[in-house]
Amino acid sequence: MTVARSAQPAVASHRDAVLSFITEQAWLDLACELIPAGQPEAENPLDPDLPGGKEEGIALLLADKLAALGFTVDLKARTPHRLNVIGALAGGGEGPSLILNDHLDTYPAGDWAAWTMTGGHPFRPTRHGDLLYARGTSDTRGNLACTLLAVEAIRAAGVRLKGTLKCVYTADEEKNGPDGSIFLLDECGLEADYTIVCEPTAWTAPDGGWGMGIAIANCGNFLVEVETSGIKTHLWRPDTGINAITKMMELLPQLEQMSFAHTPAPHAGGTPPMVTVLRIAGGVPREMQFTPDSCKAVLGVVGILPGMTRESVMADINAVITGALAADPTLTAEARPFPGALFVDGTGEQEADAEPVRTLRKAYGEVLSGEPKLYRKNAFNDTIRFSERGFKAITFGPGEDGWAPVNESIHIGKAVAATRILALTVMDLLGVEE
């Protein structure tokens, strides 16, 4: 009994020290350092036919920070300048292993002049009220700052973990992970008992109330190219040809309104399986005197659920095209997977009362009270790659599922709360040596 009474205050003292270390200013200072690091080189377009980003700058900065915290750090690259960071802090006793994951690349900033909240510079962190603006604040340098600050707080408080903690920061997430999570898992032997990916799961209600969910599953995605063909003619006599662009315009609404064969999941995701048009191209430079005889469109298939496959998605799309061909004898069209695109599966759901969901839910209640909502995240993140390989992986972070094209932001209060939740989760899941 004496041991139990003397141990409990020490544990409480550790928790108080960790939580008090995590302040708004501490998160802001770290986030404002990480957000612009290595940019704009780390911009990484999804387009398979365009060059990827270079995450080297931010990776080297994080490697130094983890080493200063006592982590053993390894840098892994499948492609030059695309470094992945694996930091490991060995446990001092019997305990599980946990990966805290985030990614180093961002999606492109687009037109810098459109970034009105950061003075025309997308990588200049700028605060307005409760929000911090810049590319990468929500997806996902601001979330990354939460993972690192949580670790800093644990180390500063002198906490000795029983289990092993790994901070894994990946390249190439925006392109579905070939140079990042897929490479680390399939070629480098990365593994752990549990994985928490700190990506956007936060929400704000119409009345201003807010919280953060736990994504216990993810939807998948796929890129498909559709081409219509026509008969070229002079622009003065369009009635003598078949305009491929016009035919594409008639076909695309049918594809946007189509349904995919699927089995509903317990948590369905933000959108049902559906098509969205991402690119369209027709006509040839120096041939404006002629109507186009070819038009190509790139479709994004999103909301993919478990059981849907590349073959089933293509079959559903081809069925729509076959129906359109039967209805219009002048239509010529075909669909194919977009060259270089990966098919991303929807994942199965982690159990609400199993680890690591259970411990994260407990920490959430301690910091914010109440229960976090459990849901299926519509977007890709590296959680999918861990889940595909049988690891217990979930997503949790203060960014919101908005993915703003410009003026991206993150709520500072949510970031501080998420950092505290992550720190408590790490200690409770891995165990603390008394």
Image (spheres, rainbow, N blue to C red):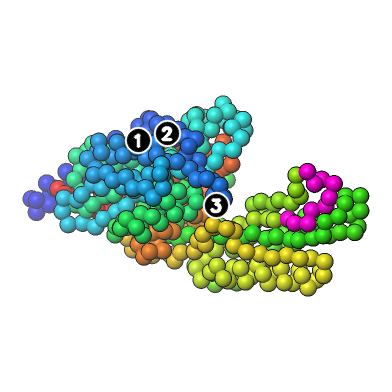
Q: Position of residue 389 (x, y in %)?
A: 38, 64
Q: Position of residue 91 (x, y in %)?
A: 19, 51
Residue sitting nearer the eye, 292 or 220: 292
- As drawn, is 21 to the left or to the right of 285? left
Q: Write the start and end of the magenta stretch as one range.
A: 286-295
Residue at the extreme left: 2
Q: Where 126 sits versus 12, above or below?
A: above
Marks 2 and 3: in contact by CB < 8 Å?
no
Marks 1 and 3: in contact by CB < 8 Å?
no
The disc label shown at residue 48, or none: 3
- As drawn, is 15 to the left or to the right of 38? left
The disc label shown at residue 37, or none: 2
Residue at the extreme top: 119
Image-quadrant location for residue 143: top left
Q: Residues within 10 Å of mark 1 (few under 14, many from 20)?
A: some
Q: Is residue 204 visible?
A: no
The disc label shown at residue 61, or none: 1
Q: Amino acid at mark 3?
A: Pro
Q: Residues within 10 Å of mark 2 (few under 14, many from 20)?
A: many
- As drawn, is 407 to the left or to the right of 373? right
User: From the viewer's perspective, is the residue at label 3 or at label 1 nearer?
Assistant: 3
Marks 1 and 2: in contact by CB < 8 Å?
yes
Q: Chief secondary structure of the magenta span?
A: loop
Q: Secondary structure at mark 1?
A: helix
Residue at image point 56% right, 26% down: 119
Residue at image point 28% right, 39% down: 66
Q: Report how far apart the C-alphas of labels 3 and 1 lie in the structure.
A: 28 Å
Q: Report how far apart the C-alphas of labels 2 and 1 lie in the structure.
A: 8 Å
